[in-house]
Image (spheres, coloured by chain):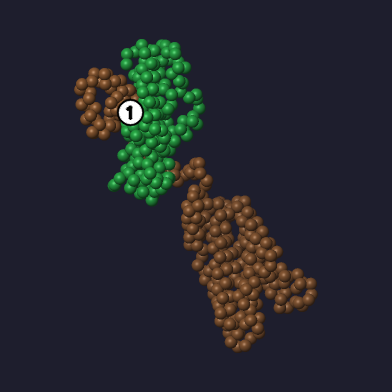
Amino acid sequence: MGSDTELLRSIAAGDATALRLLYERHSGALFGYLHRLAGDRMVAEEILQDTMLAVWRSAGSFEGRARVTTWLFGIARRQAHNRLRLRAGPPPAEMSDRPDVSTGPEELAIAAAGGTPVAAAIDRLPGHHRDVIALVFVAGLPLADVAEVLGIPVGTVKSRLFHARAAVAAALAAQEVPE
Amino acid sequence: MNELLPAYAAGSLPAADRARVDAHLLGCPRCRADLSTWQALAAAAPPVPGAAPRAPEAGRMVREVLARSTLEEPVGRPRGGTPTRRLRHLAGLLGAEARLIRLAVPIASALVMAVGVAVVLVQADLGGPERIADVALALIAPIVAAAGVSGTYRSARDPVAELVAATPTSERLLLLVRLALVVGYDLVLALAASAVLTVSGAAGTADLNTLVSAWLGPMMLLTALSLLVAVRFGPDVALGVAAGLWAVRVLAVSVLTADAWPARVIVPAWSTNAPVLALSAALAIAAVLLAGRSEPHRDHRATHPL
């Protein structure tokens, strides 16, 4: 089977095998991205399913102006926002809201985030920073593609990366854990 | 240079840039330190740090997506999607309904119409009365259409009734589609008959307009009436009512005294004019609304006493 664009054309014509091939090609990056955004495997699976359903239904509307990869991540991001907005609960707290990071609950948070303090710090980044981290380091998209997915200039992607790193470093310093 | 380091740590840098960064790193301890912080971030970023994310298995994902695509209405856009997709859906419905219509009905309609035309042609050859063309069409076309419509409103005994009851499309829409097919077909038949009679000269002085207006109004009214009765009481009753009403109309013209009140009431009610057409439309709408409301086939439940 040929390029992603050809796969999308087949999907638009109702070819389920093409959908499977496209999924196999991109599911790792998409799922990692969504898992990082949602912070929960089950929720990420649901959003990935929403995403593939949207791809199945709207493959015909792909105009070839963007690359297939950025188109896919754009859809996944929209689906994630739809579903995560609907979920109950407060949005993730800003770093500045938690100057006093101390013992008990924090250990739990670290364990939940996979055990490393850096991961826990990433988890508590504001949404737009986590989005950039997830697209660059989990999905492994080139910065130009990240800019296209988010609809912002490449320069802004870079500045968000540097801000995110500074915030993580500050959080780790507050915990007195060496980076 | 340090702007390239995040992408370098992420492994998304093109080979050429990568080589440049490699070369630079050799001689620049500051950038090496910088890189190590990005690498720490990159290592901690995956949801399960250090492990590649494992997406759900492809076969299961595709199966679930296809199942949801069939079962769920698309969210965030109007039902049915784009106009072209809606038209295609409607065309599909027309095609499907056309296949469900028993072939006997359209064939019988065409035959009756053909016999009518033949009679008029023969009469004209024999030098019959002047107005035979419009009278004959006015007699035949309405009852053909009414019989066709009452015959297509499905009874519970129809072999495809269960199939239709199981479709997700509403009964109203199906009835409308069926009506469009049957009435459209009968309209074309009657128009063709009128055209044949006009062209062949058998219609005498009457032009196409006169011929059409002779049957159009009565056809619409009788069709709408028989549809309403068919929806409420079933196709058999509808056919009987249509035939009875039409017999009265025929009698009114040929037997009753033209000036007496019965004829003066009945004849205008069965001709082509605005009130008759409006009344027909109202009756048809009532029938379609009624068809959607009643429980389908309520006289014949799934289980009934033998």
Dividing the picture into quadrants, the one containing residue A20 is top left
B50 over B152 or under it: above or below? above
- Chain A on-screen colour: green
Quarter the C terminus of chain B occupies:
bottom right
Taking the view exactly as shown, the residue that stands out farthest to the bottom is: B126
Residue with the mark numbered 1: A137
Number of other residues with Cα within 10 Å of mark 1, as a class: few under 14, some 14 to 19, many 20 or more: many
- The amino acid beneath tag 1 is Phe
State the residue at coordinates (43%, 26%): A127
Quarter the N terminus of chain B occupies:
top left
Residue A126: x and y in percent read 43, 24
Host chain of mark 1: A
Dividing the picture into quadrants, the one containing residue A111 is top left
A63, B125: nearer the viewer: A63
Residue B261: x and y in percent read 79, 72
Q: Is residue B36 visible?
A: no
Could you tell whether B141 is left or right of B264 in the image? left
State the residue at coordinates (56%, 79%): B199
Element type where label 1 sits in the image: helix
State the residue at coordinates (57%, 61%): B179
Could you tell whether B151 is left or right of B52 in the image? right
Total residue callouts: 1
A1 over B35 or under it: above or below? below
- Chain B on-screen colour: brown
